[in-house]
Each structure stands twice: as structure tokens, then as C-alpha cells.
Image (cartoon, coloured by chain):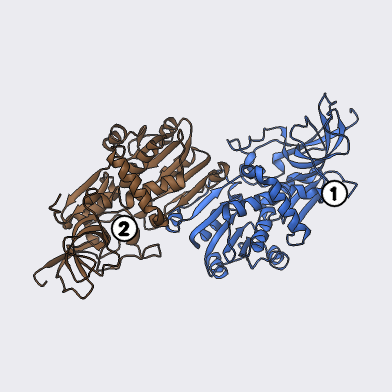
Chain colours: A brown, B blue
């Protein structure tokens, strides 16, 4: 395989605040020969996730941190182009945490084959992948919204928020989204059926806006953002409210944790429950969830939005965009063409 | 009844920070005659609760705030001394939210008769009353500790904390208490069987102490206190930890909420659950809980401690003591003698 040159995106410096081009570097190296049991996978799509920001910190978490001067890894879809493993043949489309690079070598142990005939293969990184499952499990298993209840979603125009809001609508709820631009909010209302969408960047009084949007208070808060937006929502929760902690994107870029009011007493006064989760907690229900999500997509009840950027070299910028409200829907990088599309 | 003079404790000023004598006033007034259906109750024991501090604020909560220049009310045990209500006769011992006064007139609708032969009547304000039920429901219904897990209790020498810690021991857990004096901590360890007790006032490094006390991390945190103690504990929680929010006494006296680090991401990383509650949430299970608590007391497996102060006039000071680590066990005021004791 000496003729194949592999481009890789390395993490060369841990971001202290916002990530930018200086934290990453692209290098080239020849692809080594395969050993027994190995497969060579060509990257087709890379998922660009806010959660990767947490893995750039040198800290204990549910996933080990990225190492400096190593290739970044993330959820990806690829094509097997060479195989010394009996379970895979060239042409197989697979899902795995691949490197942010053109070609990855894998032992196949964590490589899942994907049937490209069921849905566009990129959706396995979005609505049928981790973001869709986060929205589904967070809402259904933790938020447990009842028909007629009010659900507030922060980060509503992100990959998870859009799906969480739509599922809440499917369950018969009043749904209020919070996002960072009027353009996104129009989409949430007109295309996805949100009842209200609040632009947190331009509002002069987010509390008044939320209060008006939630005349019966907040029963479920699906939080992707954290920070002062969460403070405002907590002040409007109802008795027995459920707060789903899916992400805290407002905090990921901070060198030291931001401070905010100590307001846990609001949970006591309202007998409210708050729960964090990671998608793997519900892995035994993945199949059921994917089947339900796929069904809603087929019937047109659930829409998804992909923000596809072409070129491995653009992955660092796409990642930085996540933290500047520039991302809209599921952020993906197309590394190579999937010709069969 | 013109000959009976009633002493009453009024709230005359809302405390902005620590409550003290200037916020209360004792006045005297004759007891009016009973109307039909009414009963006259002589106060025997008054419960002095940290939660009353929250009701001194003019804010929306699960119980309406105290009104200025009105008599304070709280959970109490009394004796019926006159009755125009067929359901009660003089001599009945009753539980009700009575005024902080010598005599209260009630319509009997929320008056519960107590059998003084089952347990000392004062325990219906402590281990068999709301504090005991808070400890029981918080731990059993929310914390759900498994044998072998580590349970941390803040405010461990308070009425609720002592019982919560002992129940956790009965369930087979390692129990670590946090309290404000060595004297209390010796009691927690030597009398109540806590494994470790940390003095948060004298420690130079509470995080190191807690880490040493919880070598396997924290599975359940029963929080009566909030504030920076909670921050420290949250940094040590395990995967799937449960945080029981029972009280936030460190915050009640603050004019404006204290600020602290935004650390909800710790709940995400550990898939942890945090839940506030009020004891009435579980009212349908009261009987079962009281029966179990009473059984543990009879068998000597559960001990309780009452801090009994004599004299209605001392109630404001007893209340102020709660916030200065001067209280130890269940704080009660004996207003009149219960002669049959």
C-alpha cells in the first residue's frame, strides 16, 4: 500500500478557550501494510461533535482524553478498501470511531457494518446515530414528557436539539426552542413545528420571553447548553419537572468553570429531577430506538438537517464553528465521495 | 375562656441574612371563645425547622410564606383542652401545624390524633415525623443505596441527617457524615455507627478528607446543606450516582443566591441523577415508612436525639441556633408539660 498517502488531523495543543486553527495540524504519512486480521478503511464522513471539546481536556471522563500530537478520532462512516479479516470484504460500508484522516487501519473488533439500502449512510452519524439516540433516550427515558406538557429545548438548532424538539411534538407537547439566530428559529417553527423559538442572542429579556412562551410553566427541560440559559429555565419549572442534561456546550471552552447562582433549592421547591446521561447508558435499547426514529423519518414525521462540509482539511474549522452558533443541524465532513449515492 | 392569656411569637421583620431576636416579637392576647366545630389546643411541643427560614421570604414556594405581624406556625404536638367538635374530646393528644403560641384554635380539619402509648409523643415531630420521613423517603425512594455502596450525608448531625445516615448503615452501606463539630462527629461515629465523620469547620482540605473517607467514590449523596460542600462531593461521585436534595441550609440566610462553579457537567460525565423533594410527595407511603422506622427504634437499630429547650419565649433563639451549628439532633421547644410522661 506504499502508494497511498494518508492525511491526518492532529491535536497539537489543548485549547484553553475557543478552539481554532492553532490547535490542529494536518500531516501526511504513507499508509502502512495491513497485518493479519486488519482492515483498511477509507473515511467517507466524519462526525463533528461538541463533545470532542471535552476530550481535548486532560481529565478523567467516560472516554479517555485525546493525546497530543496524535490523530483525532470521532464517529465516522467509511468504506473497507482492503481486508485481511474474514468478516469484511472491500466495499463494505462501516461505522466506527475512525481517525480524522483519509485512511484508518482497524482490527475490526469495533467496526459495525451498515446496510446502505436502509437510509442514507450519513444518517448513521446523525438522526440514526448518536445525536438521534441522545435526543430519543434523553427525552423518552429521562424527560418522559406527557401529552400537553411544555418542553423547553436549549441548543434547539443543533443535531440533538432539533430531534429532541420534534420527538416532543410527536408526543403531543408544547415545544419551545432556544437557539442563536432568527434564521434557525424560523426553521424550527416553520419546518419542524416548534411552537415558539427564542433567539437568546438578540432577546433583551429571555426570562420574560420564556415566561410568555411557557404560560403553564416548564415540565421538561432538555438541556444541551447549560450556563445562564439553564438558570432562567430553572426559575420557571413546574412541580415534578424533569431536567435532561445532555450537553453543556456553553461551558466546554472555559478554562475554569464559570460561576453562577447556587439554585439547587429550585429543585427542592419543585420536587424536580435532573439527570445527566451518556448515550451508552441505554445501549440495550438502541435497536428499538433506531427502528422508531427510522419509522418517523419514513413517514415524514421527523426531519433532519445535515451541514455537510467537503474536505478533511476543513474539519478543524467545522469544529470551531460549533461554538460560534455557526453550525446548524448535524455538522459533518465529507472526506471522500460515496459514489453509490 | 376570658381567663386564658395566650402568648404568641410573631414575625415582625423578614430576615435578610441570619435570623435573630429583632425579627420576632412575643405578644399576649386573651383566647377568644370557641365557635361551633372548633377545638382549643394547648401547645406541648413545637418543632423548630430550618425549612421555616424559607417561609420567612416573600416568595412562591410549596407552602405560602409567613405573613408579617402574624403568629408563626410550625409542626406541633398539642393537647385538646376544650372542644365543640364531635371528633375530639379534652385530653386528646394531636399533631397539627399550630401557631407558635400557648393556645391555638382549630377547626379540626387538619388535626391528627396521636396515640401516646406507641412512642413518646415528641417523636412525632422528629424520628416518626417529618424529619424521619424525609430521611426515609429521600434515601429509600431517591437515593436507593445498595449494600456496599458509599453514602455521604451533609448536615449529618441534624434531625434528618442523623436518621438518613443510620438508615444507610442499616442498608449495608459505608456512611460518611459531614458536620460542624468534633463533639457531634464523635457521636455520629460512636453512637450511630457512621464509618467516618468530617468536621467541615476545622478541616484544612475537605476534598482530601472526603477522598480518603470514600476510597470507592460516592454513590449516594444525601444533601441537607448545599453550597461548597456539595461542590466537593459532586467531584467525587461515581457513575450512576444519586444526589438527594433534601435541604440547602447553607443558602437559606443569603439575601441573594451565592454563586458557585457551574458544575452540572459532572452529572453528565457520571450519568448521575439529582432530585429534590418535599416529604408530601410520598404521603401515600407514610404509614409504611413510620411502621418501619418505629420497628427499627423498638429493636434499638435506630437512635434519635432531641434537643429540647423549655419555654415558648426561647423559640426564636432556638431557631437562630439552627444556622450556627449550635443545634444537634432534632430541635424542639417544650411549651407545656405533658403530665402523663
Q: Where is residue A284 in the image (x, y as percent from the top left)?
A: 40, 56
Q: Quadrant of residue B57?
A: top right
Compared to A46, does B69 lie above or below? above
Residue drawn at 48 percent across, 44 percent down? A242
Q: Where is residue B144 in the image (x, y as percent from the top left)?
A: 58, 56
Q: Position of residue B134 (x, y in %)?
A: 65, 49
The secondary element bearing badge 1 is classed as loop
Disc assigned to residue A52: 2
Q: Which chain carries label 1?
A: B
Residue drawn at 90 percent across, 46 percent down? B339
Which residue is identified by label 1? B117
Compared to B13, does B231 lie above or below? below
Residue contact at pointers 1 and 2, CB within 8 angstroms: no
The secondary element bearing badge 2 is classed as helix
**Circle 2 crowding by C-alpha within 10 Å: few under 14, some 14–19, many from 20:** some
Disc assigned to residue A65: none
Q: On the rendered structure, is B230 left or right of B337? A: left
Q: Quadrant of residue A25?
A: bottom left
Residue farthest to the bottom?
A35
**Circle 1 crowding by C-alpha within 10 Å: few under 14, some 14–19, many from 20:** few
Residue farthest to the front?
A86
Q: Which chain carries label 2?
A: A
* Quadrant (top left/top right/bottom left/bottom right) for the N terminus of chain B: top right
Marks 1 and 2, how far apart in space?
64 Å
Label total for image: 2
Q: Does the image show residue A176? A: no
Q: In which quarter of the image is residue A266?
A: top right
Between B210 and A42, the one nearer to me in the picture: A42
Amino acid at each position: 500500500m506504499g502508494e497511498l498517502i494518508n492525511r491526518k488531523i492532529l491535536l497539537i495543543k489543548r485549547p484553553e478557550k475557543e478552539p481554532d486553527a492553532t490547535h490542529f495540524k494536518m500531516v501526511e504519512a504513507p499508509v502502512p501494510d495491513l497485518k493479519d486480521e486488519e482492515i483498511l478503511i477509507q473515511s467517507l464522513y466524519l462526525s463533528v461533535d461538541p463533545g470532542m471539546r471535552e476530550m481535548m481536556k486532560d481529565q478523567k471522563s467516560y472516554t479517555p482524553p485525546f493525546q497530543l500530537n496524535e490523530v483525532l478520532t470521532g464517529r465516522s462512516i467509511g468504506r473497507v478498501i482492503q481486508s485481511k479479516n474474514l468478516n469484511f470484504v472491500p466495499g463494505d460500508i462501516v461505522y466506527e470511531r475512525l481517525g480524522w484522516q483519509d485512511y484508518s487501519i482497524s482490527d475490526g473488533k469495533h467496526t459495525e457494518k451498515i446496510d446502505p439500502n436502509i437510509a442514507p449512510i450519513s444518517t448513521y452519524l446523525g438522526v440514526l446515530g448518536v445525536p438521534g439516540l441522545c435526543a430519543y433516550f434523553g427525552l423518552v427515558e429521562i424527560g418522559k414528557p406527557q401529552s400537553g406538557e411544555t418542553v423547553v429545548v436549549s441548543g434547539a438548532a443543533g443535531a440533538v436539539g432539533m430531534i429532541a424538539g420534534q420527538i416532543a411534538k410527536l408526543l403531543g407537547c408544547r415545544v419551545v426552542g432556544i437557539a442563536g439566530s432568527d434564521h434557525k428559529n424560523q426553521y424550527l417553527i416553520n419546518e419542524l413545528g416548534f411552537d415558539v423559538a427564542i433567539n437568546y442572542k438578540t432577546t433583551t429579556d429571555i426570562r420574560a420571553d420564556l415566561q410568555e412562551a411557557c404560560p403553564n410553566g416548564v415540565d421538561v427541560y432538555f438541556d444541551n447548553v447549560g450556563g445562564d440559559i439553564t438558570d432562567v429555565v430553572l426559575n420557571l419549572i413546574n412541580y415534578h419537572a424533569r431536567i435532561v442534561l445532555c450537553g453543556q456546550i456553553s461551558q466546554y471552552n472555559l478554562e475554569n468553570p464559570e460561576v453562577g447562582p447556587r439554585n439547587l433549592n429550585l429543585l427542592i421547591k419543585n420536587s424536580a429531577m435532573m439527570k445527566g446521561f451518556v448515550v451508552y447508558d441505554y445501549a440495550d435499547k438502541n435497536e428499538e430506538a433506531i427502528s422508531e426514529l427510522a419509522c418517523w423519518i419514513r413517514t415524514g414525521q421527523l426531519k433532519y438537517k445535515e451541514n455537510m462540509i467537503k474536505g478533511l482539511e476543513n474539519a478543524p474549522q467545522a469544529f470551531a464553528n460549533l461554538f460560534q452558533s455557526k453550525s446548524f443541524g448535524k455538522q459533518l465532513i465529507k472526506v471522500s465521495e460515496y459514489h453509490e449515492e
